Amino acid sequence: MRAVTPPALRPPFARYSHAVETPPGARLLAISGQLGVGADDVAPEGAEAQAALCFANIAAILEAAGMTPRDLIRLNAYVTAREHLAGYMAARDAFCAALDPPPASTLMIVSGFARPEFVVEVEALAARTA
């Protein structure tokens, strides 16, 4: 994987890449949006705790597919209010700390999810060469 950061652009605001190029022949894995809810159907309080659980779920899916977080090329995240941005970004930056390059990333504020206690959802795209 190769980060693409043209010098004419402002550097990324946080731990993400403007773009990530995958090599020819890479196997892609599209991961559906993961909510901050455990197998016990309990959602922890707060955006950071929910986001950490989203990333743990993503890591489990990657492992089941024979991949690791190093194979992530894109994250799309959604929070329900501006006050959840910092908690989400703290969890994302901790999860992505060792990833080089970090995945491309988008973060949006949305009106809500299926249940009112959910405040974060994260979907991902991963690629691995044969």
Image (cartoon, rainbow, N blue to C red):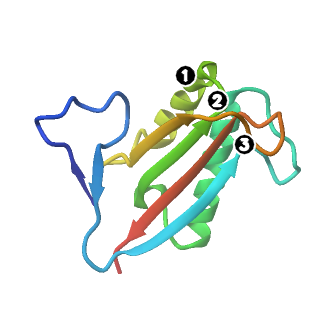
Residue 119, x across and y down, in percent: 71, 33
Q: Earlier in the sequence, mark 1 or mark 3?
A: 3
| Residue at 21% across, 49% down | 4
| Residue pointed to by mark 1 | 86
Quadrant hosting residue 43 = top right
Q: Amino acid at mark 3?
A: Gly
| Residue pointed to by mark 2 | 48
Residue 89, x across and y down, in percent: 51, 30
Quarter in which the C terminus is drawn: bottom left
Alpha-carbon distance for marks 1 and 3? 16 Å
Number of the label disc, if any, that sits on residue 43: none
Q: Is residue 9 left or right of residue 30?
A: left
| Residue at 63% across, 35% down | 110
Alpha-carbon distance for marks 3 and 2? 9 Å
Q: Residue furthest left?
A: 7
Crowding around mark 3 (Cα neighbors within 10 Å: few <14, some 14 to 19, many 20+) is: many
Kindly state the secondary structure of the residue where label 3 is placed: loop
Number of the label disc, if any, that sits on residue 36: 3
Q: Earlier in the sequence, mark 1 or mark 2?
A: 2
